[in-house]
Amino acid sequence: MPPDPHGGDLFAGERWVEPLGPGAALLGGFALDRADALIAQIHALSAVSPFRHMETRSGRMSAALTNCGAMGWVSDRSGYRYTPHDPLTGAPWPALPPLFARLAAEAAAALDFADFRPAACLVNRYAPGARLGLHQDRDEGDRIAPIVSVSLGLPATFLWGGLERGARVRRIPVRHGDVVVWGGPSRMVFHGVAPLRHGHHPATGGFRYNLTFRKPG
Ligand code: MD6
Ligand code: FE
């Protein structure tokens, strides 16, 4: 839990850890010190590979998505896969900014996942109402390496389930600068994002951004 939900600026710079399971935790405030720089990078890379709403077998995703890194996650009516090129521009995805790589490695190391070098970074943009249904990240060959998920801007509710779809789901508040890491025995946990509520955030206006780092393997 945050040190004090009413603390405001008194606790700026605080970090805290909320364990979620073996190999999984919420790292509260972990990315707060570099949040502005992360958001500036998101604007720069989305000027090259724009946000778009991808189709899936079950419909259009409500969150807009782009990628950076050697491989990008894409979805269409035929399914999910990783590609080295952005299908929208035909060009390679923008390179993983060093700031992103460093943050992902540091967050993974906080849970004892050494030398995490993600090849893929999904960048999601949630507008009010956007959501992500309960799912497993199962398109990666490497199913031990952690997922590192960074929240920026408007707060959201991260849904944290179990290894089976029917397991009890915990509702975890994720705020600007929070990082969730899940790997090892928790790598295949079902997770999602509850519909984003309207709001205004000084750093992102009416949006929540999420960076999801992965090793496609
Ligand atoms: C989040 N995103 O936005 C977590 N998974 O907090 C995901 O878990 C995710 O955005 C698969 C594909 C796209 C995603
Ligand atoms: Fe996911």
Image (spheres, helix red, strand yellow):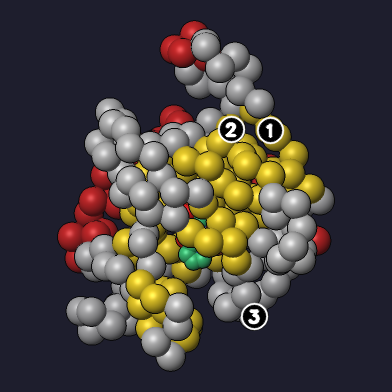
Residue that sits furthest to the bottom in the current view: 78
Q: CA–CA distance between discs 3 and 1?
A: 28 Å
Do labels 3 and 1 touch, CB within 8 Å?
A: no
Quarter-of-image position of residue 27: top right
The circle on residue 17 is: 1
Quarter-of-image position of residue 35: top left
49 left or right of 157? left
Q: Nearer the viewer, residue 212 or 135?
A: 135
Tell me what residue is drawn at x 47 percent, y 68 percent. Answer: 120
The circle on residue 141 is: 3
**Element marked by disc 2:** strand
Mark with earlier residue (2, 1): 1
Do labels 3 and 2 touch, CB within 8 Å?
A: no
Tell me what residue is drawn at x 62 percent, y 75 percent. Answer: 138
Where residue 51 sits in the image (x, y, percent)? 26, 63
Kind of residue sitting beneath label 3: Gly
Mark with earlier residue (3, 2): 2
Kind of residue sitting beneath label 1: Val
Where residue 209 sits in the image (x, y, percent)? 37, 48
Do labels 2 and 1 touch, CB within 8 Å?
A: yes
Residue under label 2, please give it: 28
For disc 2, does the CB lie below 8 Å from ligand 1?
no
The crowding category of the residue bearing disc 2, from other C-alpha atoms within 10 Å (few below 14, some 14 to 19, many at least 20), is many
Relative to residue 113, is residue 206 depicted above or below? Answer: above
173 left or right of 76? right
Kind of residue sitting beneath label 2: Gly
Q: CA–CA distance between discs 2 and 1?
A: 6 Å
Residue 71 appears anywhere in the view: no
